[in-house]
Image (tube, rainbow, N blue to C red):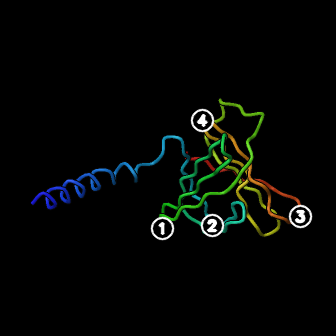
Amino acid sequence: MLMNNLAKSLLIAALCSLPLLAAPSENAVRVYAPFAFVAGNVHMPAGSYEISADQMTGVVTLRNLDNEQQRAVAALPIDAYNRSVKPHVEFRKMGAVMSLDKVWMSDAAVELPAPGHESAPTGVTLSDD
């Protein structure tokens, strides 16, 4: 009987915590990328994403909202960070490849290393507007 009550209590506690785990981060930007792209060395499909950045650790987290897959990639802090910038992400197009370039958050800004391509980059910016 005691084990049965303990098991029920643990199940209720686990179920109550699920909405907290699934809640979007306050410090994340949601964007729709209508194209596949590269983030670090990770290939990401087109779709809706929640992207967050931690300037202290240099980690960018990308969560695909369509399939719930999550990836973390390394980035470098941007020193000349302007806190008045609205949260957004910037992509770099080099040849036929789109890559995540910069992530601007309310409290962090980071830049991802460019994949090795020879052609000149052009930019695309997406925000959660």
Mark 3 element type = loop
Q: Upstream in the sequence, badge 1 or badge 2? A: 2
The residues bearing labels 4 and 1 have C-alpha atoms spaced at a distance of 26 Å
The residues bearing labels 4 and 2 have C-alpha atoms spaced at a distance of 24 Å
The residue under label 1 is which amino acid type? Asn
Near-viewer residue (72 or 48)? 72
Of discs 2 and 3, which sits in the foreground?
2
| Position of the N terminus by quadrant | bottom left
Q: Is residue 69 above or below residue 13?
A: below
Locate residue 40 relative to residue 71 in the image: left or right. right
Mark 2 element type = strand
Give residue 24's position: percent from left, percent from top. Answer: 45, 48
Q: Are marks 4 and 2 in contact (CB under 8 Å)?
A: no
Q: Upstream in the sequence, badge 4 or badge 2? A: 2
Give residue 27's position: percent from left, percent from top. Answer: 53, 41
Residue that mark 2 sits on? 44
Of discs 3 and 1, which sits in the foreground?
1
Q: Are marks 1 and 2 in contact (CB under 8 Å)?
A: no
Residue that mark 4 sits on? 106
Q: Are marks 3 and 1 in contact (CB under 8 Å)?
A: no
Q: Is residue 61 above or below residue 47?
A: above
- For image coordinates 58% across by 61% down, the residue present is 71
Residue that mark 1 sits on? 67
